[in-house]
Amino acid sequence: MKRPLVVMALVALVGAGCTGAEEAPLASTAPDSGLAAFYGQKPDWRDCGDDFECARVQVPLDYDAPDGERIEISVIRLAASGERIGSLLLNPGGPGGSGIEYTRAARSQVSADVRERFDIVGFDPRGVGESTPVTCMSGPDLDAYLGLDMSPDSAAETTQMEEGSRAFATKCQEKSAKLLPHVGTADAARDMDVLRAIVGDEGLTYLGKSYGTYLGATYADLFPTKVRALVLDGAVDPAVSALKMNELQSKGFEVALTAFIEDCLEAPNCPFRSTTVEGALDEITALLRQADKQPLRNTLGDGREINDTWLAFGIATPLYDRKSWNVLREALKTAFQGDGTYLLRFADILLGRRADGTYTNQTEANKAVNCVDHVYPLDTPAYDKAATAAGKLAPRFGQFVMWDSLPCAYWPAKGPDPDRRLTAPGAPPIVVVGTLRDPATPYEWAEGLAEQLTSGVLLTYDGDGHTAYMSGSSCIDSAVDDYLINLKPPAAGTRC
């Protein structure tokens, strides 16, 4: 369930050209003469509304064969409102999250002080959104795959998971074969260095959230002397193996769910009959088991059966943002009454499903990048064993998170250097931000990444929700802004 940031879409649900000037000459030379043409591009920036400019740049499909096929990366920027230092590159996470969409919300995602001093630049990483996207399945096919019982309790259900996961991998190979080996994080990091040069910066200034922390750390490891300032918020620890990462993430959702229930039990409209945390957790367990046997009502009219898989995705989604806890209370109230529609709509946000039944390529890109980046078992019994163990540690989420990775057992492509440790020797201070009760990226991952990076500095937020910057903590925001603008990292051990 390693998925992109969902806060903006949650807020929406709760609430219900001309050519630009040419860039300055390159600030640095390309690391390889074969790449000079890419580093020397001058994009045709065009007005794309609301004071943003958009462009497309070219990068090699395969960096080992720069004279071969090229692909396009879509880029967007918002000009600095004051005296410009340079550009701040953004990535919202995922993998599979659209940096174009995220940057269009820059006025709420980046402080006014930072926007005054930096052009805010976003991009869809290769394989994502508008940047030569991975394509695999139709909307109905994705409905069927995502609606599989990801808590199989019989041989027949396990076989269905195997067949559905194999079909997903096969469809991706049929439609995106040339792209699949080249959508990994290392290639995306190399694209970022091309973007850094194109916007004229000597060193990269970057804000990455969730998976974007892995992308940023990979960049620092590849190009440590090209780092100016990196903020890695909601960190992923590259030293953690793939299935262990699933286990820890499922435990993170359990921690966040417990925090939600503790808050709920003090609220006037809490839907639980029990007055204790354990009792409320048991009620959610019972709800999932009930949906596993008899799907809940779906009033959307799209034919989907709301089983326990859709419910688990739906319950997890509002845990990303504390401001959505009030609507999670309402969604659970209707679910306890037999109607799962509200939670299904939350699941659709997490999975990139539109109201018309089509999907963004978020889910497909998520699988494509994860399966290339990491080493996964190739046999079903390994997932079965891991899911059973995760289900004991995280009873509400463990099995669903673990079985969600099964397509990687059949994936037709692997990256050149999976599961590499990232130390970035020689890089200047890199700020790693961790939230104590983050559901999707557990705090211990931030501790691990900060320790692994030679120049890592850990900044801790004692709070809830996924990622910390611009989430309501003036302490976090001030520390991050001071670092980005003035290159003053917070003192080691700073806690907000």
Image (cartoon, rainbow, N blue to C red):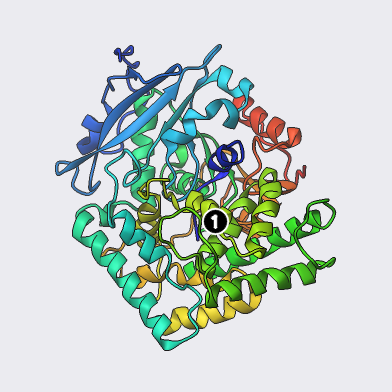
Residue 437 in view here: no
Label 1 neighbour load within 10 Å: few <14, some 14-19, many 20+: many
69 lies above or below 366: above
Residue placed most toward the observer, 343 or 420: 343
**In what element is the residue under mark 1?**
helix
Q: Check the image and name the residue furthest to the left.
A: 68
- Up the image or down, 183 lies above or below 88; here it is below
Residue named by callout 1: 341
Residue visible at 64% across and 70% down?
287
Taking the view exactly as shown, the residue that stands out farthest to the bottom is: 155
383 w.r.t. 45: above or below: below
Give coordinates of residue 117: x percent, y percent: 56, 18
Could you tell whether 377 is left or right of 114 in the image? left
The quadrant in which residue 467 appears is: top right
In the rendering, at what x and y percent does residue 89 appear?
Answer: 47, 32
What kind of residue is marked 1?
Thr
Q: Is residue 433 above or below residue 449?
A: above
Q: Is residue 213 visible?
A: yes
Q: Position of residue 168 (x, y in %)?
A: 31, 65
Of the 4 image quadrants, the one containing the C terminus is top right
- The residue under the point 80% across, 58% down is 262
Counting every numbered tag in the picture gives 1
Query: Which residue is rendered at x = 55% and y = 66% of the image?
Result: 296
Question: How far from the left and from the top, in percent, is residue 314?
Answer: 56, 57
Question: Is 214 left, or right, of 38 in this rendering?
Answer: right
Q: Nearer the viewer, residue 16 or 137?
A: 16
Identify which residue, 13 or 129, lies in the foreground: 13
